[in-house]
Amino acid sequence: MNKQLWDKAVAFHGHECPGLAIGFKACEAAAEKLGIGRSNDEDIVCVTENDACGVDAIQAIFSCTFGKGNLLYRGTGKQAFSFFERTSGKKLRICLKPKKNEGMERAQWQKYLLNAPVDEIFSFSEPKFAVPEKARLFNTVICEICGEGAPEHKMRAQDGKLVCMDCFKIYDRGW
């Protein structure tokens, strides 16, 4: 285990926990199996299937962030992360295997995760989707109801006006 990288992830997240250890080990697995490291721009993309602690490790270690557009959320709730390396075309989905922490205290589970071989704690497969396109810049459009700006691709037409998603009233007849 790279103690310096673990300390960096802990400092970013704010505390040690098993969830952070899952993301840390996912980074270790991606680095080992894809030969990737820190992302300077959007060359490495991570699609996370959860919004838990482990995502902070990915941000701290690989510099995949929502702001840069190379960290994307796909909310399945699974402890799974798909990594793409744009230059080489390499890709890998890493998913936590069913828990082996029966009877382990929280600290024991964290220690196990940090020290176990990645092949013991994760399953590996190819992502079922292509690498997401690079982040695009969109024009800002002013909502005709609240007056706030939002990117044009998030606006909706309603009653002849362009409105933001907060002001848009969904037409739903109950089915």
Image (spheres, rainbow, N blue to C red):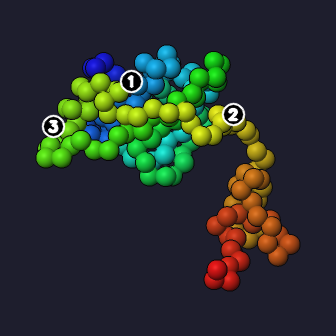
Q: Residue furthest bottom?
A: 173
Question: Would you say the residues marked 2 and 3 are in contact, meaning their CB atoms lie under 8 Å apart?
Answer: no
Left or right of 164, for residue 39: left
| Residue denoted by label 1 | 28
Q: Position of residue 8 (x, y in %)?
A: 34, 26
Are dots 1 and 3 in contact, CB under 8 Å? no
Q: Nearer the viewer, residue 73 or 159?
A: 73
Residue, x 15% and y 37% (percent of image)? 108
Residue in view at x 63 percent, y 83 percent? 174
Q: Is residue 55 visible?
A: no
Label 2 sits on residue = 134
Q: Is residue 44 above or below residue 145?
A: above
Q: Residue at x 63, y 40 (%)?
A: 129
Would residue 94 be found to the left or right of residue 106 on screen? right
Q: Amino acid at mark 3?
A: Gln
Label whose residue precedes the other's in the sequence (2 or 3): 3
In the image, what residue occupies the spot 54% across and 46% down? 73
Query: 10 Å neighbourhood of mark 3: few (<14), some, or many (≥20)?
Result: few
